[in-house]
């Protein structure tokens, strides 16, 4: 049994919240319990000896009101040296925190309905709802109420505080656009069959060092069954998932061994106590979620405006301005997206130009360009597992390449990570870079390099990228990307995607 499995048996993980005030008062964390802080969304940041922490904050259904964003910005300013990141799982992340500050930070978050319970650790992570929920005319159902019920039932629940590994759930309802169900442990994808709206259920998606795309259970369940089915699948994973080797503990390994049919049978007989209705697959998205950028019409005649960050980093002062703009031009709410961007919905058509102009002064205007579809993980700046730099390097690359590649008529997704863990899903990008270290052949000195994965897609192609044999030294990352983009632009047919 791994150390963390032993630790979870010694102290039920969510009880770490009871110990945080004690650690804060002493200014010291019990080193034997430090890994359990993940269940409170808190990790040591790199270098661990310095004692600083990072924290992930869940954004339920990816939607928050302007006041909550001001609180988030205030925490980044007061405790986090002005650093605020939007993650690709639609959460916020702070850095440079001290254990002494954690109780006040948790209190401040609670005042605006935000929390960190289960943001990390071997439990149900934030339940992801589409950022388009309730807005886009192409959706077949607004998944937010179901996502809220799922989050309330499963996430932070003591019944599921000790899963074999992390567990991710998504709900989406615009099959034409979104493919995120393919990379979640459970992906609920709504679609319509003969006038009835139901959910296609996918299981066992997960990236990490070995990527698995989710498999269909072959069911078509009613919206009012989704939470019950989610609970049953999670319980099946808790009881039957593998716990010996943490590298092979995600649900994807159980699904690989059992197959979706047997796993479905297990869920139906042992957990639901009834069969689920079988049904046809939902239609498949062409690009898999990357084409929702810019300004878009809502079904009610208003508009949602996706503001483009650079690799998810937002200055807290700008975040405060965004809160003001959401109140002035929208209805005082904002959303976070899976491409580390944010969105202001409910904007009247006559106000769009003024809002876009305001966003331009913040360098956050909507851009259907590389900047909007390029994401990078935390990397060596703060992550203890990282092998390479990520955000600063990619930000520099985008600044250089964006003006040169404005003519592409399809989205082009670049995802870069600082190690094989795939926090920013390099296996399902047009161009995926996975950071590593290697000895330089001539000098013998250790250098940062990137493995290249080409043409992965959670859209129609449903494939993980092809790993090239060669590697790209960090010093040539921009040059390499430039050449790929130039070749693609020169040889593609109109409307043809990179995967095609
Ligand atoms: Fe850290 Fe690796 Fe995850 Fe990046 S992919 S945040 S380097 S663990």
Image (cartoon, helix red, strand yellow):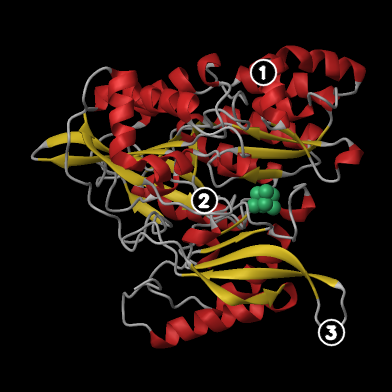
Residue for badge 3: 442
Q: How far apart are marks 1 and 2 (CA)?
A: 27 Å
Badge 1 crowding class, 10 Å Cα cut-off, few under 14, some 14 to 19, many 20 or more, is few
Quick check: 437 left or right of 68? right
Residue at 31% x, 61% y is: 460
Ligand 1 within 8 Å of disc 2? The answer is: no
Quick check: 430 left or right of 136? right
Query: Which percent across, then down, holds residue 385?
Result: 74, 49
Query: Which percent across, then down, holds residue 425?
Result: 53, 54
Q: Which of 371 and 479 is in front in this view?
A: 479
- Residue 291 sits above or below residue 305 on the image: below
Residue at 91% x, 17% y is: 26
Query: Which percent across, then down, holds residue 112?
Result: 59, 21
Residue at 57% x, 21% y is: 161
Mark linked to residue 9 = 1
Ligand 1 within 8 Å of disc 1? The answer is: no
Residue 343 visible in the snapshot: yes
Q: Is mark 2 on a helix, strand or loop?
A: loop
Where is residue 476, by image quadrant?
bottom right
Q: Which of marks 2 and 3 is nearer the N terminus?
A: 2
Where is residue 45, by image quadrant?
top right
Mark linked to residue 207 = 2
């Amino acid at each position: 049994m791994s150390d963390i499995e032993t630790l979870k048996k010694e102290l039920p993980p969510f009880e770490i919240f009871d110990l945080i005030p004690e650690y804060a008062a002493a200014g010291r964390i019990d080193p034997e319990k430090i890994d359990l802080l993940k269940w409170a969304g808190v990790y040591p940041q790199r270098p661990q000896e310095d004692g600083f922490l990072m924290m992930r904050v869940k954004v339920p259904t990816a939607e928050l009101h302007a006041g909550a964003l001001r609180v988030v910005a205030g925490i980044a300013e007061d405790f986090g040296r002005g650093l605020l990141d939007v993650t690709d799982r639609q959460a916020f992340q702070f850095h440079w925190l001290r254990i002494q500050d954690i109780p006040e930070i948790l209190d401040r978050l609670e005042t605006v309905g935000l929390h960190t319970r289960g943001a990390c650790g071997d439990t149900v992570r934030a339940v992801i709802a589409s950022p388009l929920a309730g807005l886009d005319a192409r959706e077949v159902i607004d998944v937010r109420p179901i996502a809220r019920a799922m989050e309330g039932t499963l996430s932070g629940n003591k019944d599921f505080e000790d899963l074999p590994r992390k567990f991710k759930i998504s709900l989406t309802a615009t099959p034409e656009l979104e493919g995120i169900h393919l990379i979640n442990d459970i992906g609920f994808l709504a679609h319509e069959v003969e006038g009835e709206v139901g959910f296609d259920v996918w299981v066992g998606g997960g990236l990490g060092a070995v990527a698995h795309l989710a498999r269909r259970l072959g069911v078509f369940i009613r919206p009012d069954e989704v939470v019950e089915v989610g609970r049953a699948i999670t319980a099946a994973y808790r009881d039957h998932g593998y716990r010996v080797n943490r590298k092979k503990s995600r649900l994807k390994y159980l699904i690989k061994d059992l197959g979706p049919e047997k796993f479905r049978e297990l869920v139906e007989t042992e957990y639901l106590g009834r069969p689920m209705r079988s049904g046809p697959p939902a239609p498949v998205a062409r690009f898999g979620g990357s084409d929702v950028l810019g300004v878009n019409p809502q079904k009610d005649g208003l508009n949602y405006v996706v503001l483009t960050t650079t690799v998810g980093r937002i200055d807290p002062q700008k975040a405060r301005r965004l809160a003001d703009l959401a109140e002035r031009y929208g209805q005082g709410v904002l959303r976070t997206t899976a491409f580390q961007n944010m969105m202001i919905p409910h904007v009247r058509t006559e106000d769009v130009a003024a809002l876009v102009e305001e966003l331009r002064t913040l360098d956050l205007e909507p851009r259907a360009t590389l900047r909007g579809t390029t994401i990078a993980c935390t990397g060596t700046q703060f992550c203890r597992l990282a092998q390479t730099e990520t955000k600063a390097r990619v930000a520099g690359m985008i600044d250089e390449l964006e003006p040169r590649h404005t003519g592409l008529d399809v989205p082009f997704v670049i995802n870069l990570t600082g190690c094989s863990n795939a926090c920013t899903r390099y296996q399902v990008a047009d161009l995926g870079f996975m950071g590593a270290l290697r000895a330089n052949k001539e000098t013998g000195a250790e250098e940062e390099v990137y493995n290249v994965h080409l043409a992965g897609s959670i859209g129609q192609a449903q494939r993980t990228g092809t790993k090239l044999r060669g590697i790209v030294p960090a010093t040539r990352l921009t040059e390499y990307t430039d050449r790929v983009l130039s070749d693609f632009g020169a040889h593609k047919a109109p409307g043809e995607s990179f995967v095609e």
